[in-house]
């Protein structure tokens, strides 16, 4: 292990479990899955504070992603306080000696961290509701006005500041629910989105994830507008899997 006085390089984790955790990520959410996997190795103590993470090149091979994806994941976890970079002879990426608490929005003293059962309940219900909503909306005959509303919400979400992003993101998802044609679905999704946002308040708002979410929003809306229920459901499921991976990584 590296010591704080820089007396030598910190060893890279080589425990057997590390090989199981440093494995190929699923297609579709490479960035979020990479962050989640790296967080898992830290939270489970596979790579201890002060120890070195595997080199970027090695991580990219293990995860089956590009080095740019690994680099973005490392940068995001560095910004969140889980990792730090050192230069020089014994340089590399290391787990922070003092890991951050679970709160990232300035509310850590007022927001209790959810239990694993609570987390899975919220995420499971979200998938059932929102995948169904996307499929139903795509299966209906939408008016020009309906399509214009979707595109307007899509544009405002893409243009939202980091501070406002979750609000506009919620509005877009609720607009999809409204077009599903089942009025009672909307308050169910609204309640679930509130719970999801409460969970998201425990984790950092990551710029790369916002970019990825916006691209997936484009795919969801395109499928709904084109009237393709299967593609809309698949795009929504993949989209939800990205934020679920981050939430499980930080809170699981």
Image (cartoon, rainbow, N blue to C red):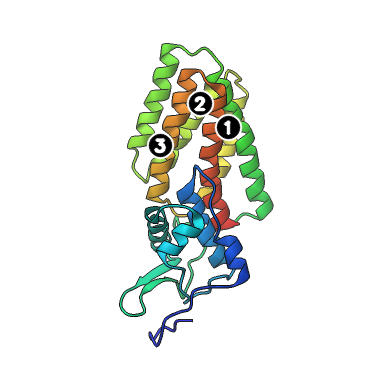
Q: Are marks 2 and 1 in contact (CB under 8 Å)?
A: yes
Give the tally of numbered discs. 3
Residue 12's spot in the image, x, y percent?
49, 74
Foreground residue, 57 or 225?
A: 57
27 over 63 or under it: above or below:
above
Disc 2 or disc 3, which is closer to the eye?
Answer: 3
Q: Which residue occupies 65% across, 55% down?
A: 115
Q: Can residue 157 be seen in this view?
A: yes
Q: Which of marks 3 and 1 is nearer the N terminus?
A: 1
Foreground residue, 222 or 251?
A: 222
Q: What element carries label 3?
A: helix
Residue 85's spot in the image, x, y percent?
36, 70
Can you say which quadrant of the picture contains the C terminus?
A: bottom right
Per the image, the residue denoted by label 3 is: 215
Q: What element carries label 2?
A: helix
As drawn, the residue found furthest toward the left would be 88
34 over 93 or under it: above or below:
above
Report whether 208 appears left or right of 124.
left
Task: Check residue 130 in the rendering and tell me which mark sits there, or answer none.
Answer: 1
Q: What element carries label 1?
A: helix
Q: Earlier in the sequence, mark 2 or mark 1?
A: 1
Foreground residue, 74 or 187?
A: 74
Q: Is residue 197 visible?
A: no
């Amino acid at each position: 292990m590296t010591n704080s006085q820089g007396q030598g390089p910190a060893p890279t984790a080589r425990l057997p479990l590390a090989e199981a955790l440093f494995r190929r990520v699923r297609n579709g959410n490479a960035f979020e899955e990479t962050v989640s996997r790296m967080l898992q190795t830290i939270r489970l103590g596979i790579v201890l504070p002060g120890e070195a993470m595997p080199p970027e090149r090695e991580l990219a091979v293990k995860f089956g992603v590009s080095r740019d994806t690994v680099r973005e994941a490392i940068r995001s976890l560095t910004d969140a306080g889980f990792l730090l970079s050192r230069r020089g002879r014994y340089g590399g990426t290391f787990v922070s000696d003092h890991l951050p608490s679970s709160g990232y929005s300035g509310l850590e003293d007022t927001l209790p961290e959810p239990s694993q059962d609570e987390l899975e309940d919220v995420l499971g219900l979200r998938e059932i509701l929102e995948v169904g909503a996307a499929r139903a909306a795509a299966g209906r005959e939408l008016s020009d006005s309906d399509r214009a509303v979707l595109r307007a919400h899509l544009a405002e979400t893409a243009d939202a500041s980091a501070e406002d992003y979750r609000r506009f993101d919620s509005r877009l998802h609720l607009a999809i629910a409204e077009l599903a044609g089942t009025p009672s679905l909307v308050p169910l999704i609204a309640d679930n989105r509130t719970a999801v946002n409460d969970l998201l308040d425990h984790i950092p708002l990551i710029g790369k994830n916002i970019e990825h979410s916006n691209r997936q929003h484009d795919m969801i809306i395109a499928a709904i507008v084109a009237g393709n229920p299967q593609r809309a459901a698949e795009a929504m499921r993949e989209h939800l899997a990205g934020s679920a991976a981050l939430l499980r990584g930080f809170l699981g």
